[in-house]
Each structure stands twice: as C-alpha cells, then as structure tokens.
C-alpha cells in the first residue's frame, strides 16, 4: 500500500523500548488508516516502530527475525484494521498481534542462534574486566529466564525490560491485571533463587 510497509527501517539497534506516544490524535489517525490513507499508516509505523522492534527482539533474540516479525505485524494490522473496535486503545491491540505472532514464531520456526547485538550497546569507557562481568551476568540472566514458563518469561520481558505497565500487559495478553502481577511475583522469586544458586556455585 505504501513505502513504509515495504521498506521498514533495518538499522535499529535492540534498545530498551521507548513508550509509543499516545494522544488524542491517535483515534483519528487510526480512522484515516481504516479509510486507506497511506500517510496515516506511515505515521503509525513511525510511532510504533522502535518499541515494536525492541519487543520483537526480546521475543526472538535475533535482529533478522525481529525485523521480519515487525514487518509482518504491521502488514497484519493493516489487513485487520477494519476489525479494530472503535473507541479502544490501539497500542494494546497492536502489541497483542505482535506478541502472539512472535510466540508462534518462537514455537514453530528454527530461529537463528546468533545474538548480533552491536558493540555500540556496551558502555563507552567500560573496562575489559567490567565488560566481562556484565557479559557473564547477561548470560546468567538469559539462562535463568529460559527456565521460566513461557507466559512468565513474556510478562517479565514486557514489564522489566520494555517498560510496559501491568495493566498494559493485561490488555496485550488478555488476562487480568492481578494475574500479571502474580506472574511477576513468581518470576522474580524464581529469578532470585536461581541467581542465588549461581552465586553460591561461584563462591
């Protein structure tokens, strides 16, 4: 339909997601997309691209897979926009599509195993020793995260790493806010126990 759909940016690093702007203009923007306005779709892409990529990267762990997921999600949203319920917030609906497609991809596709995080993500001026410690901690956290039930892992990724509120996650995953907070509590307890075990082993 437009250039944004066929040429999404590919030079994005996997940053912590920045909250997409939400304002009174967004419902009108969605309505314009519904009417087939390509400029409005471009505007939605620009609003949600960076956060969408960050979430996709958390889910799939690989730049190319994340880029594919984001592009597929924007195209899916464009196809489904007529079914979007007027008066509801666009963001939870969009990220529900993204997360569901990402979870399906994680289950069904043979994902690449490389994690091509750019060197630029390391803090400038960090000593080699400190950088090694940070790398080891990230590996430990990744290993511990992989032991969590999938729903808990997704909730932790969205809440702790991408800055979504528990109410937003509840809308995205279509579960109660209390259920989200319970999963967060259980996941944090499991992470603390696992990391404590790592420390005892190293000691």
Image (cartoon, grey):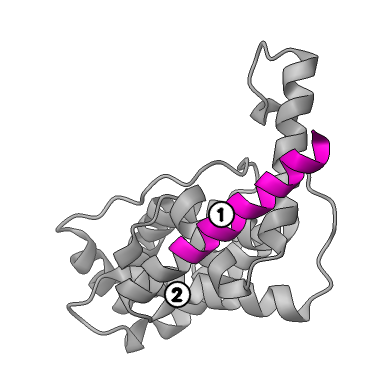
Which sits in the foreground, 110 or 73? 110
Relative image position of residue 43 (x, y in whole percent)? 36, 55
Res 116 quadrant in image: top right
Residue 200 drawn in magenta: yes
Q: Magenta residues?
A: 185-203
In this picture, residue 202 sits left or right of residue 165: right
Mark closest to the chain's N terminus, 1 or 2: 1
Relative image position of residue 84 (x, y in whole percent)? 32, 83
Tell me what residue is drawn at x 38 percent, y 75 percent: 179
User: In this rendering, does residue 168 appear at all?
Assistant: yes
Does residue 153 lie above or below 129 as drawn?
below
Which sits in the foreground, 8 or 24? 24
For the residues labelled 1 and 2, the Cα–Cα distance comes to 14 Å
> Where does label 1 land, which residue?
53
Tell me what residue is drawn at x 66 percent, y 45 percent: 196
In this picture, residue 197 sits left or right of residue 113: left
> Where does label 2 land, which residue?
96
Does residue 51 lie above or below 78 as drawn?
above
Q: Secondary structure at mark 2?
A: helix
Which sits in the foreground, 82 or 161? 161
Residue 166 drawn in magenta: no
Tell me what residue is drawn at x 34 percent, y 63 percent: 166
Relative image position of residue 58 (x, y in whole percent)? 61, 56
Q: Are marks 1 and 2 in contact (CB under 8 Å)?
A: no
Of the 4 image quadrants, the one containing the C terminus is top right
Res 7 quadrant in image: bottom right
Q: Secondary structure at mark 1?
A: helix
Q: Identify the main secondary structure in magenta.
A: helix
């Amino acid at each position: 339909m437009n250039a944004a759909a066929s040429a999404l940016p590919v030079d994005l690093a996997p940053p912590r997601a920045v909250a997409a702007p939400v304002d009174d203009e967004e419902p009108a923007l969605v309505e314009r997309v519904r009417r087939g306005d390509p400029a409005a779709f471009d505007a939605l892409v620009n609003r949600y691209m960076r956060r969408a990529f960050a979430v996709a990267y958390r889910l799939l762990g690989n730049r190319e897979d994340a880029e594919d997921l984001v592009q597929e999600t924007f195209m899916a949203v464009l196809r489904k926009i007529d079914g979007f319920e007027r008066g509801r917030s666009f963001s939870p609906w969009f990220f529900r599509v993204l997360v569901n497609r990402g979870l399906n991809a994680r289950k069904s596709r043979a994902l690449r195993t490389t994690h091509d995080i750019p060197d630029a993500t390391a803090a400038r001026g960090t000593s080699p020793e400190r950088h090694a410690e940070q790398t080891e901690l990230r590996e430990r956290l990744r290993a511990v995260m992989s032991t969590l039930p999938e729903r808990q892992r997704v909730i932790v990724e969205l809440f702790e790493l991408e800055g979504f509120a528990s109410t937003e996650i509840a809308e995205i995953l279509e579960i109660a806010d209390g259920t989200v907070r319970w999963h967060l509590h259980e996941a944090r307890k499991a992470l603390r126990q696992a990391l404590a075990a790592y420390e005892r082993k190293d000691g």
